Image (tube, grey):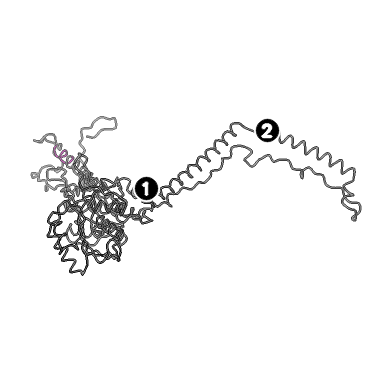
Amino acid sequence: MQYSADGQSDGAVTAPQPGFLASVFRDLGVEPEDDGPTVRPPGGPSGPSDGPSPDGPPGVGGDEAVAAHARAAALTHHRTLTVQAEQERLAGLLRRTALPVSAMDFESQLRRYEPRPYPADGPDTAGGEDPEPRWEDFAPEGPPAADPDEAPSRRLLDSGYQRELAQARLAHQRALREWRTRQADAVDPVADESRRAHHEAEEARARAVREYNESLEECRRAYRQAEPAAVESLLERALAAAETHTQDLPAPCRAVYRPLTRTAVLDLDLPALDVVPSLTGYRLGPDGESLPVPRPPADRSADYLRLVARLALRALQAADAVDTDEILAGVVLNGWLREPAGAEPLCLVSVDADRDALARTRLLPPADPDEQPDGEGVYADAEQDEALVRLRGLGAAVSPDPYGRAGVEPAAQAAATVPAAPDLSANEFAQLVRELLTRGGLGQWSVRLRGPAGLVATGEGPAGSALPGRWVVWASRGDGPVGEEEIHTLAEAVREEAAERGLRLTTGHFTDGALDLTGAGGHRHIHLVDGDGVRELARTQLGLPLAAGR
């Protein structure tokens, strides 16, 4: 509708300019539907029809359909941009979780006190300071000598010079009295109190720094003595500092140190599953609806596992870097998915690595998640991800399908500082057996076989020790009984290794048949240690407790 200059309608209808709707659709990224050329009756008018339309007023139905289509296209575009922003955030998280972490050893935590000067607040500290009168500014010049050869003492006896000298001394003393009076009058109680408060604050700052450093030295001493509280405090500080680059992705990690096996057990809280977008974007349906385009489940699982692997490697690197005095013999890390609905936590990744394995592994993956080898299929990409490859190189167990709630068995339980045998990891149990027997005199320790349930090793003790000669050791953990068949198997291994004795160690118990067999003449060289004996050895050889099995 057009209007005249006086604001009244002139009755004319203004049609949209040609190409206007096409430009709107082009800006929204949507191609307008082409309904084909409009067929008009021969001889009919070429402009818009002024007659009534069966669908309503002229042009209204078509414009509403086009506007609704444009709104749907705009909504689809906006939702797709939102999904793309979520994908970019995930890519940023993958990059930041691979950044190096700062070392958190004791030296880096020491504080240094730097005194702060009192701020200038008056004329006495400015450029116009009132100096104390000096005698040099009042002393008269000496009398001129009448004879160049005359001694200086003769000139000082001149009466005129003496009068000038006396007057100068009086003037100097008067200036001193006036200066002292001005100084006394210039004392400001408020400024004096401010200086005193500043001095006390500086003393408090220096004392706080000194006390903090002394407490840090005490923590260092306790850490070097492998006290659990000190080791756990240092580890958790390092793990918290490792989260500096990803403050927007909380992943707290708790540490439990077990002196019995010199192992740190880390419980890492993994991010929620919805941190990885479930959609690729949105598309416009044939009916004008905004339809979501889901991602393939394998792609989503692969991205989540890539993030989990980087978080796990970062925690391992932080724990390894902070242990400068090599207190730890190994690290166990369990990654837990904790559902907000109160369900049981699900372990999605578990690593059991000793110090040597951590030293051999480069724990920082590439910072750019796109710098990965090319592979065929989504599963190939996940398997070739550098972080996952390095994590599996440490013997990690990783969930095959986190979104299907497929968990893994934790390598160790971090329930208590004093563990029971079932709580120990495979590396912890192997470390415990070796420590017990080497303390008893068995040297030249060589592991032949090792698995989650136990190990087989050989060793040799010097004559006169508690374990003299060459031994074959078979150690296992578990509550089940050890029977006669395993005793026969150990006896055969002793013969094959040309050893003199065999030791069957278990955290469980032996059957009556096994006990009777080792008392017979043919198997007297086989020695047995059950769960009670293992706990007694830990107490006597290591001075540390091992809890009874649960």
Q: What stretch is highlighted in magenta?
A: 61-67
Residue under circle 2? 184
Residue 91 versus residue 208 in the image, above or below: below
Where residue 203 appears, x then y in whole percent? 53, 40
In the depicted view, which residue is nearer to us: 243 or 302?
243
Amino acid tagged 2: Ala
Residue positioned most to the front: 521
The quarter of the image holding the N terminus is top left
Where residue 176 appears, x then y in whole percent? 74, 37
Magenta includes 486?
Answer: no
Q: Is residue 93 left or right of residue 347?
A: right
First in sequence, mark 2 or 1: give its number: 2
Name which quarter of the figure residue 59 lies in.
top left
Where residue 10 appears, x then y in whole percent? 23, 32
Where residue 105 appears, x then y in whole percent? 40, 52
Q: Residue at x 71, y 36 (%)?
A: 179
In the depicted view, which residue is nearer to us: 418 or 540?
540
Whether residue 27 appears in this view of the structure is: no
Main SS class of the magenta portion in the image = helix
Residue positioned most to the right: 147
